[in-house]
Image (cartoon, coloured by chain):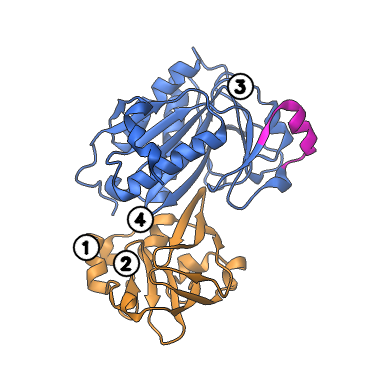
Amino acid sequence: MTAPAADRGRPCLLVDLPPMPYTEALALQHRLVAGRIDGRLDSDVVLMLEHAPVFTLGRRGGLEDLIVPRDRLTKAGIVVAAAERGGLITYHGPGQLVVYPILDLKTLGIGVRELVTALEQIMIDTAADFGIVADRDARNRGVWVGEKKLGSIGLAVRHGVSFHGLALNVDLDLTPFSWIHPCGLAGVAMTSLAAQGGIGVSMNTARRRLARHFASVLGCPLTLTALDTLKDLKTGP
Amino acid sequence: MKEIDALNLPEDVRYAEDHEWLRPSEDAARIGISDYAQDQLGDIVYVELPAVGRRLTKGEEFGTVESVKAVSSLYMPVGGEVTAVNEQLAEAPELVNTDPYGQGWMIEVKVTDVAEVAALMDRAAYLKALGG
């Protein structure tokens, strides 16, 4: 099933969301995934947003990779949330672009493994637009600039529909990453497009660039859509 | 990624839409995921399985399989009571990749309704569903 499906190229809805608490975005994803599985939602959807500061744990947990006391987080106003995605602990916060692709992989004609590779490519191409050379590391997935991690991936799949996704560090305070072993990797330093001296870095530009590369790498043109147009799904399971 | 005609799809199991297989048996039907599924997922690093004794209905989630950076849900091809889980997968989840119908089996169930087994796909029907 390596060949693209026949209807690959059909539009996919891009929803630009305001900054949102993690649990709220998770509930939204669950509604959209349920709708995509049972057919009430007949297009793939890509959510783009920033989160309020949060540490999230993967399906296997990852609290052991939190290396500061919990009350330090409370003082800093950072919550900890469980997520059912792959990967271990990570941090999300303002200035990091989070992208949740809710894709019917069967229609798209790709497997989970290929989606991980595609999401890496999308981040590599986006970084290149800002003059930054980023690369993948076959042993530690995600996107790297030298030894520093620029972007992370953590997906979940239900009935062939993907959710969760990628997080690209655009321009953010990287301090909270030093409180964890990101993705369970000790001694890994994080970086951002801004910290790498990217040319003309802004969240808005990063969103537009990433959307363009998403469409091109996955072969699905993106149509900017208001969340309200998906409101019928809000009453879903 | 394997071509469809290169997939290992044995005749002695039945297949579900979500790519699980079931090997029919009176009181202990084994369940796992197909060669197609393991190939689509890539290297499996963790398998989460249910407690023995749990009763699950057809289509209910019985566990998850984590490949690199992705967690995928596993669904019951038929309803039944879990009578055993493959403890070996805790230490060696890669068996799902290397031997999906053998050492990579996941759970054993006492099937509630044999009609649900009959409704699963045979090799030819599954192959057709895969587009082969």
Q: Are marks 2 and 3 in contact (CB under 8 Å)?
A: no
Residue A97 shows in the view: yes
> Same chain, marks 2 and 1?
yes
Residue A229: say if magenta.
Answer: no
Query: Regarding mark 3 in the picture, which secondary structure is present there?
Result: loop
Q: Which residues are magenta?
A: A66-79
Q: Are marks 1 and 4 in contact (CB under 8 Å)?
A: no
Residue at 49%, 12% (x, y): give it.
Answer: A200
Measure the C-alpha gap from mark 1 to mark 4.
15 Å
> Could you tell me the amino acid type at mark 1?
Gly
Residue A215 shows in the view: no
Label 3, on which residue? A172
Residue at 25%, 49% (x, y): give it.
Answer: A3
Measure the C-alpha gap from mark 3 to mark 4.
37 Å
Residue A69: say if magenta.
Answer: yes
Of the numbered discs 2 and 4, the one sitting upstream in the chain is 4
Residue, far left: A6
Q: Which chain is orange?
A: B
Q: Quadrant of the N terminus of chain A?
A: bottom left
**Callout 1 crowding tier (Cα within 10 Å): few <14, some 14–19, many ≥20:** few
Q: Colour of chain A?
A: blue
Label 1, on which residue? B132
- Mark toward the viewer: 1 or 3: 3
